[in-house]
Structure formats: C-alpha cells, structure tokens
Image (cartoon, helix red, strand yellow):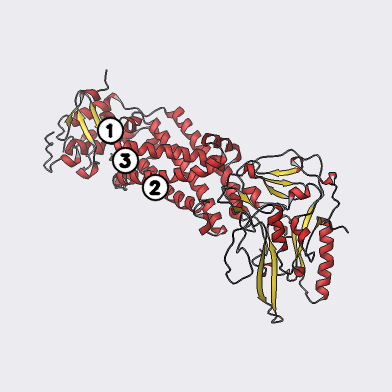
Amino acid sequence: MTDSTLHGRPAPQVTKADIDRGDRLHVGREVVVDRYTKWARVNHWITAISLILLALSGLALFHPSLYWLTALFGGGQWTRAIHPWIGVVLFVSFAGLFIRFFRLNLPRREDAQWAAHIGDVLKGDEEKLPEVGKYNAGQKFVFWAMSILITILIVSGLAVWERYFSQYLTVPQLRVAMLVHSMAAVAIICVWIIHVYAAFWVEGTLRAMTRGNVSGGWAWRHHRKWLRALATYGKRDDQSPDGRGPAT
Amino acid sequence: MTINVNPPVAPDTAMQMGPQDYIRRSASSVPAPARQLEAVAKLIDVSKCIGCKACQSACLEWNDLREEVGVNAGVYDNPHDLTPNTFTLMRFTEWVNPETDNLEWLIRKDGCMHCADPGCLKACPAPGAIVQYSNGVVDFVKENCIGCGYCVKGCPFDIPRISKVDNRSYKCTLCSDRIAVGQGPACAKACPTKAIVFGTKEEMKAHAAERIEDLKSRGYANAGLYDPPGVGGTHVMYVLHHADKPSIYAGLPDDPRISPLVEAWKGVTKYAGFAVMGIAAAAGVLHMAISGRNRVTVEDDEEARRLTAVAPGAAPLDPSKETLS
C-alpha cells in the first residue's frame, strides 16, 4: 500500500473488488483513468435519450400548458402511441446499465459518513469527506432512485397502456396506476435534474461519459479510494494477486 | 308538458347548438358563452322498459355503427359490454326482492350519463377532445381525441370505450347532432313504451315526479329519481323502482363522484409536481451561482501523479490521450 498516511489520515483498505471491468489507469506526463467503456457509454446515452423523450412526451400529456410538446412527436395520437414504446426501450437499456453498474453502487460504510457531510459536499470541500470508491453516496442515490422509479414506471405504464394491457385491469386499478405513474414521473424528472446538475457542477465529469475517461486529479479529488485501488491493483481482470502489472 | 320526441321537422333555430355554446372544453378554456341554452335531459323510466333493445338498434342505425356478431353467454345482454360501437346497452339483472321473495327482472339502459361535472372531461389531456354544452350535453370531438384512455379513468360510470380501429374514444353523444336541429335522441324516438323520453331537464323532473308517485301508489315505496348530486346531477336520469339501492341495477353506482385518485392525479400532482421540478432546477442554478463549479486543483493532479508514480497496475499513457497542451 503506497502513501498510507497521506494528509495524516490512514488510507482506506482497497481491494481489487473496488475496480470495475474496463477501469484502467494510464500514467504518462499526466494521469488518465478509464472510467466507462465504449459500450457502457453507448448504453448510457441510449438510456439518456429515451428518458428525455419520455419526459417530453409524458409532460405533454401531463399538463395542458405543455400539450404543444406533442408537435415534437407528430401530434397527440403519435405522442400517445410512441411514449410506451420509448418506455420499453428505456427499460431494456436501463437494465443493461443496471447490470453494468450495480455492483459498485451497493452501499458501503463510508456512504453514511459521506451523506452525513452533505454540507461539505455542497461546498465542494471534499477533504472533509471520507474517501469513496468509484461511486459516492450521491451517485448511488441517483442509481438506486432511477432503478426503483424505472421499475415503478414500467409496471404502472404497462398497466395503462391502452393498446395492449388496459383491458386486463379494472378502472379503479387503472386510476391507481395512473396516479402512481404520474407521481413517479415527477420524481424521476427531479432525480434526472440532480444527475445532470451534478455532472455539470463537478468539472471534468462529463468527459467520463463522452470520452470514457477522467483525469487523475479528478479521480484523486472525488473518488480517491477508487484511484488507490487502481494504483495498487491496476486493471482488475489482468492483475495478478501479488500486485504486479500484467504483460501488456 | 311537451316531450320532445317527435318535434316538427322544421328545425328549431333557437335550440341550435354549436361551439359557441361550449361551457367547458378539455385541457383548454372557452370564453363565457353569450347565451345559456335551456338544460336538457333524457329520462329513462326503468319501470316501463320491456327490454326490446329498440334503443340499441336505433343508436346503431342513427350513428351508422355495426357491432360484430358475438356469442351468447346465457344472458340477454348483447353485446356483453359497451364497446366503441355500442354507445348504449340494455343490462339485464335477475334480482330476488328479499321483502317479497319475488324475482324482479331489472332492465337498465346503460350509457353516458352526461354529468354536470364530467370526470372524463376533467381527465382528458387533449385540448378540445371533450366538450360540454350549456344545455348539459357532454360530447367527444373525435378529431381532437388522441386515444390515451384518460377519460376511461375519469368516468365514474365506466362508459367511454377506446376503439382499437382508430384509437379514439367513443360514447353516447346524447345525439348532439339531432338535438342541434331540435330533434330528440334516436333511442328516445325508437322506444315503444316511452320508457325513454327527452326534453328540458325541468320537464323531465316533473314527468319523473308523476311516474314516481304512480310507482309508490303501486307499492314501490322506494321509487325515486336517479340524478346523482355527487357529479353535479346528470342529463340522463333514471326513474328507479328501488332508488334506495341503485347498485342492484347492474352496478349503477350508489353515490357516483369523480374518484379522489383522479382528483389527486389531475389536481395536486400537477401543481405540486411542477413546483417540485421547478424547485429542483432553481436549486441547481442557485447552488452554481453561490458555490461555483467544483474544480480539480493543481494539487489534486500532483497528488494523483505521486500516488500513481509507482502504480504496479498502470499502463503507459497513450500519447493521443494527453490533453495538456
């Protein structure tokens, strides 16, 4: 373990399990860390586009003042017809993201500490926070909130899908589904606002989902435990247990 | 009293109704109409109905609809439920009166009740797909309908049906096209026993009062008018011999009202939803303005270099990934 007493604080124990498949450290004149593989990014952006289209088409039918948004989809009939299909795409696409990301989004002890210091998080005062792995508690919140809300939305959405499924439910059941669907939609839009805002606010983050990598300084500042794990074990799958690098 | 089933052929221009008489229009607003049409109503006297289904046939004929040939499930109801083509349906109930132990055959002509406070219109997201005229007629405007089925959830009587053919919602129009030219609804015109009559709402209430008096004199102590106040009254009313328990008539709601779930969905969820989304976005803007962006410092980069200088797992950096200039 290198630099175990940096800043007078003991460095947390890291293991190979703190690294995702595809995460990789590149050291040269500067440090670059691969964070998301090409397919993870493609998967993410399909999900992102679906979510935005769903929000636009859903809001169009949510409030009369936004009905004009139906023009983006070719009118009211098209909006009504296409919205559930985009929902299916989102669900399948998000399922891919879930499989890719869920392991490192499982809660860890430092998450409670991190969340308790939410004031320091908002101030950007990260030296006061516990070192976190690939995802901090905020990111984990977004991940699990999205997972739960998308599940609620697909179930309630299928229920009120007039074309194929509504006839199997009673009207009182449909009313519950409709209310749940609209409330979950409001909630997921709020989670989405938090997600997008955080990505813009923390400079150097967007690059992880565009080019797939982040700077070493970014990893050190925001996900130090993850960087330590990478420095110690390197690319997870290719690393032998003695800590020696693979033959590239 | 005039029961306007067979009016003069010459159109009654004073009664002509059109878009200028809208008092409500779904997902949009209408200017207050310059005139107030007299409220109309259809009165269905269940005690006089013989279950001949002439009203159903007349409805299909006037509206130029065809129902598919179905199957017999052992009851007289045909088809088994309202459909996008069947705006009105005779529902037959065999009910044993616990007081007399007599079997009573209850026949109710089901269809849109034309509520004064229409749940379908409240739920509808498409501007102008559902309208309400000042005489009480609630009508669907097919051209504006998007087929979402929200009206189905909004309706306290389970009336609208969405067509799988053109993805639009259908229900009884109260023959708005006939009323507009001074005629009564086709079902009322076809009814051989005058169990269905049509006129102004006041006339129909007066007529109902006579009928109820008659029924009471014949031993139906609970005979009464079904004009449920929970939906502001309706422009289709029933005379029921057992008005104390409407639900025995094939599930006619005892106290219909727009479901609180629909009220919540169309009320507080909308306003609270917009507020919460707005607050989330405003909080982001405000936070950015106050604290600025969270930037990686030169020290962070140096620390990363120090930490990774001896990293066993590191690969040499591909020069194309260098972003420093």
Asked if the residue under mark 2 is in contact with the one under mark 3, i.e. CB atoms within 8 Å, the reply is: no
Query: What residue is drawn where x is 61% and y is 44%?
Result: B145
Where does label 3 land, which residue?
A135
Q: Is residue B118 above or below residue A206?
A: below
Number of marks in the image? Answer: 3
Which callout, 3 or 1, points at the residue further toward the start of the chain?
3
Q: Identify the mark at residue A147; answer none if there is no mark.
A: 2
Q: Position of residue A204 (x, y in %)?
A: 33, 29
- The x and y percentages for residue A62 are 56, 43
Work out how far the residue at label 3 is from the one at label 2, CA to CA, in angstroms.
Answer: 15 Å
Counting other residues with Cα less than 10 Å from the Cα at mark 3, is it few (<14), some (14-19), or many (20 or more)?
many
Question: Which part of the image, by quadrant, shows the N terminus of chain A?
Answer: top left
Q: Is residue A98 left or right of residue A186?
A: left
* CB within 8 Å, label 2 to label 1: no
Which SS class for mark 2? Answer: helix
Chain bearing tag 3 is A
Query: Which numbered tag is attached to residue B9?
Result: none
Asked whether residue A37 appears in the rendered view, the answer is: yes
Q: Is residue A176 above or below residue B48?
A: above
Is B200 positioned to the left or the right of B297 in the image? Answer: right
- What residue is disc 1 on? A219
Instruction: Answer whether labels 3 and 1 touch (C-beta < 8 Å).
Output: no
Q: Amino acid at mark 3?
A: Tyr
Q: Amino acid at mark 2?
A: Ser
Q: Which one is closest to the eye, mark 3 or mark 2?
A: 2
Residue A29 found in image quarter: top left
Q: Secondary structure at mark 1?
A: helix
Residue sitting at x 83%, y 65%:
B209
Foreground residue among A139 and B247? B247
Label 3 sits on a secondary structure element that is loop
Kind of residue sitting beneath label 1: Ala
Name the N-terminal-most of marks 3 and 2.
3
